[in-house]
Image: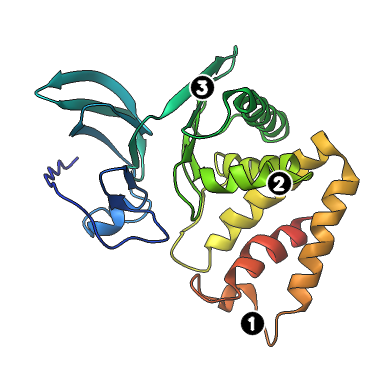
Amino acid sequence: SKEIEIDYSGPINRTINGVNLISEGLTEIALYCAWFPMLKENQNFTYFLTVTLPEGQRVVCDSEISSEAVKEGKVTWRCERKTPGYDIPLIASGNLKVKVRETEAMKTEVYFRQIDESLIDDVLDQAIRAAEIMTEKFGDPTTKGRLTVVYSPRSGWGYSRIPLIVGPEENYLRRLKSDKGKIENFHGLAHEIGHFWWSVASTSTTDDWINESLAEFSSLYATERVFGRAEVAKILKNYTTQILSLANAKPILETKRDERSAYVLFYEKGSYLFE
């Protein structure tokens, strides 16, 4: 085994869609390992992490928080990941609230800032139901017993760092204005939960279509179980339209992850193939 020690401080000014930043209002590290080439992709490891921030900030990560200490207007959190993972994700912000629900199989937490607390119960219901359906279908996930959902106070994109799921709170607030928002939220949340089973291929090559299409297929399966086949048929109809609209599309295995057609091919066409 090898030990790596990293120490850094200060702001991060370059971001990816508002993610990977250290700022006064929000710290969010989504692709920590991308900064350090010695941490190879899909190389699992355990870690200790110490974070010092202004007092009043709440920290969420994919590990267990072992201590919290306040001194001279700053709070220091110590986190420990005992089971191997492949990244060091971190979210920290002031005024983050949390709701927790424990079942026999799992402890589920939802972190949020602006969403009405009465609506968070729906999110807890959705997360637990999606995880239950997939466990029944596929067996136990690689990491079980904990599911943490963070609605980060930003726009942008979402991702999974098992057992952590992070998405933009702005999107959820927008969905609340739509009649189909509840289905959309379940569908998106279930996709990220699907990665608890389907994080099996390289994420930096065309093989990532396996992860994304199987997670999306699993989400469609769970969505059908909860909302019925008619709702999934609407989603697939939309996928068909987008797939057919791709001009001169290459095969999935010849499509790079950063090409414009990759999302439709990896997520939509891939899951349609499994359908």
Seen in the picture, residue 149 relative to 246 is either above or below; the reply is above
**Element carrying mark 2:** helix
* Of the pair 27 and 253, the residue shown nearer to us: 27
Of mark 1 and mark 2, the one earlier in the sequence is: 2
User: Which secondary structure lies at badge 3?
Assistant: loop
The residue lying at 66 percent from left, 30 percent from top is 135
Decide if residue 48 is on the left or right side of residue 236: left
Residue 5, image quadrant: top left
Task: Report the amino acid beneath label 2.
Answer: Glu
Q: CA distance from mark 2 to mark 3?
A: 25 Å
Residue 89 x, y percent position in the rendering: 35, 42
In the image: residue 31, left or right of residue 237: left
Check residue 184 in the rendering and tell me which mark sits there, or answer none: 2
Q: Position of residue 2 (x, y in %)?
A: 16, 42
Q: Is residue 230 above or below residue 151?
A: below
Camera-side residue: 29 or 259? 29
Badge 2: how crowded within 10 Å, few (<14), some, or many (20+)? some
How far apart, in angstroms, are the residues tagged by discs 1 and 2?
Answer: 29 Å
- Which residue is identified by label 1? 250
